[in-house]
Image (cartoon, helix red, strand yellow):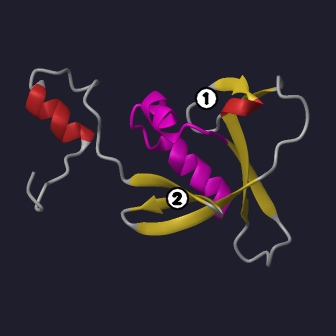
Amino acid sequence: MSENAKTYSAREIVLSLFPATDAALVPGPEPYRFEATPEGLRVHRDGAELVLLAAVSSAGRASTQLLCDLCQRSAPRPYLQVFRAEVPGSKGRRYRYVTLCRDTRGCEARRRGEDGPVEALLSRVLGR
């Protein structure tokens, strides 16, 4: 293996190995990227960080069903996490809360590359 090894996106791999794949099944380009960090979940668009979603500690029964705001998956608390983001200009007095899957890759797959749910989430969190 050479030091100049190139990495390929899921889209490039599918199109090179299975060129006759239906367009609905080919992974689309991903303008948004979710990065898990010790501080929480960072949302990036085209390389620029948009918002930091801080994890909220779980409380209540573990069997309580929650709904992911991105992929609309309903699951118990161990599979979903509640996050909060500070409303811009509120100086820490107001927050927006969202529920997201802990498995970000699975959530992305269930959304099928649609950016509508991410845009709606960001408009709520950032107040656009």
Nearest the viewer among 93 and 128 is 93
Give the magenta part as a residue range: 100-128
Residue in front for this viewpoint, 30 or 115: 30
Secondary structure beneath label 1: loop
Q: Nearer the viewer, residue 40 or 15?
A: 40
Q: Which mark is residue 72?
A: 1
- Amino acid identity at mark 1: Gln
Specify which label sits upstream in the sequence, 2 or 1. Answer: 2
Residue 64 percent across, percent down from the top left: 83, 25
Q: Is residue 112 magenta?
A: yes
> Which residue is tagged 2?
43
Residue 38 on the magenta span: no
The 10 Å Cα crowd at callout 1, few under 14, some 14 to 19, many 20 or more, is some
Residue 121: x %, y % from top left: 60, 49
Q: Position of residue 27 (x, y in %)?
A: 29, 34
Residue 37 circle label: none
Marks 2/1: CA distance? 18 Å
- Look at 42% across and 38% down and name the residue there: 114
Identify the residue at horizontal 70%, vertical 42% (top origin).
81
Q: Are marks 2 and 1 in contact (CB under 8 Å)?
A: no
Q: Is residue 95 above or below residue 70?
A: below
